[in-house]
Amino acid sequence: MHLTNLTSGLPFKAAWRAALLFLLLSIAAGVVLIEAVENTLIDELQAQVDVETALFTEIYRERGRSGLLEALQVISATPEVPKNLSGLLAGNGLSLIGPVSRLPEFVGTKRHEVTYMTAGKMSGVYVLSVRKLDESTLVVGHSDRNVLLAKKRLTIWMLSFIAWITLMILAIGLWASRASLHRLDRMETALRQVGDGDLSARLPLYKDNDQFDRVSHRVNQNLDHLEHAVSGMKATVTALAHDLKTPLSHVQIALYAAADNAEGGGDPLPKIEAALRETENLNGIFESIMRITRIRAKSDKNHFACVSLQKLAEKSFEFLKPLSEANEQVLCLEIDRCLGAEDNLPVHGDEGMLLQAIINLVKNAVVHAGQGATITIAVSKSAIEVRDNGTGVDEKDLDRLVHFFARGDAARGTEGSGLGLALVKAVADHHNAELLLKNLHPGFLVRLAFMPKNPV
């Protein structure tokens, strides 16, 4: 990865901002800390000078000038002379002892340059305490070199610490930026594969449950839906091309036959009527496909309302009872007796869609169960099922019966387009319901169950 790519990443930019903020705050805090340490050391130095001044003053009071001169002589002989300054001057400014050769310009305690007062014998800034002892002037001082040295060392250590932490923050930012760019590259690769037509490609998941994983999980869900939709579209196009070829051929043959009858002086009307019947069947197929497509594409569920499964079952029963009687079949309606009569078995959904789905289930049983079969519509609190005692379907056909134009081998000789269960499946998916197809040996069962924990 190029360094420019790393530094342009959001993690590094965030680290850079954090490092800059840390740098500014640390410098401000360092200045305050160093100033506080310096002031503390100066205060201690001043306290020490005041103590020594008080001690010399006490000696002067007890032993006079001679005793003070002896004490100052002892102090001057110590090896700490370069750091300490002590002297006594007469009233006329004559130095009696010590390096101070000029009277100070102040009385009290103060930080002051001593080069002028010592005629160049000593230099630098000292914390001086100047006191009048009768006609004499006592000068006691300590150099602030140790304070300056401590300040310098503390500044160096503080700047080194700040620089090290800042570099660490930037290094962590580069590492995080590299990691994020690596994941983004893998995500981009997967999306490029999808764009090139590989709908099986998925974004990588690292199980960190971070923003990348959440985005990848959502995109993968959408890719699953896209793959399913594209696969369904391909299957639908293939099925349309296959299943519409026969009725279109029938229409073409009927029209050619009508033309031949017209040319030969015969009656073309029967052939034209046959062609119209085929076109009506085609129109019904296209309407069913469009209805299924609209249901699959609809995501808005704001129109859902409380719908009674019992009432839907009763409507389907009344609507298809004449057709079952024409087939010499027995159509029954069963309501779960464990529920009170006042409980209308409500679900939350689209009444029109659900009624169409239930009618399709019952009609499918009436058409394919066979003459003399018994068909039962059973309703419970969270499900409705249609079962019969007919011949059932081949086990290998169960999984594909909900696809477009899918029909079992036993149903090839009966009417229908193979779209009934596909529409029921679309309605079930739209209502988050489960569609179950099962052979009963003998017979066949289709169950539409609504999930209790996620009601439709």
Image (cartoon, helix red, strand yellow):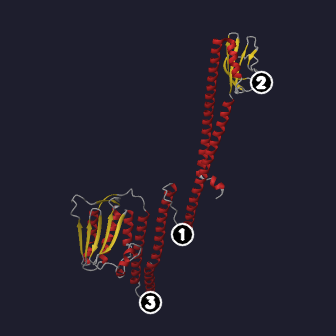
Q: Amino acid at mark 1?
A: Asp
**Residue 45 sits in which quadrant?**
top right
In the image, 66: left or right of 186? right
Q: Which residue is mark 1?
A: 198
The kind of secondary structure element at disc 2 is: loop
CA gap between label 1 and label 2 equals 90 Å
One can see residue 138 in this view = no
Q: Are marks 1 and 2 in contact (CB under 8 Å)?
A: no
Q: Amino acid at mark 2?
A: Lys
Foreground pick, 337 / 253: 337
Residue that lies at the very extreme toward the top in this rendered image: 134
Residue 97 in the image: above or below residue 33: above
Q: Amino acid at mark 3?
A: Gly
**Residue 404 sits in which quadrant?**
bottom left
In the image, 150: left or right of 243? right
In the image, 406: left or right of 160? left
Q: Which residue is mark 3?
A: 264
Percent x, y of residue 217: 48, 60
Camera-near label (3 vs 1) is 1
CA gap between label 3 and label 1 equals 57 Å
- The residue positioned 41% from the left and 68% from the top of the image is 292
The kind of secondary structure element at disc 3 is: loop
Percent x, y of residue 240: 45, 75
The kind of secondary structure element at disc 1 is: loop
Could you say which disc has been placed on residue 40 in the image? none
- The residue positioned 63% from the left and 52% from the top of the image is 7
Q: Which residue is mark 2?
A: 121
Percent x, y of residue 64: 67, 11
One can see residue 160 in this view = yes
CA gap between label 3 and label 2 equals 145 Å
Q: Are marks 3 and 1 in contact (CB under 8 Å)?
A: no
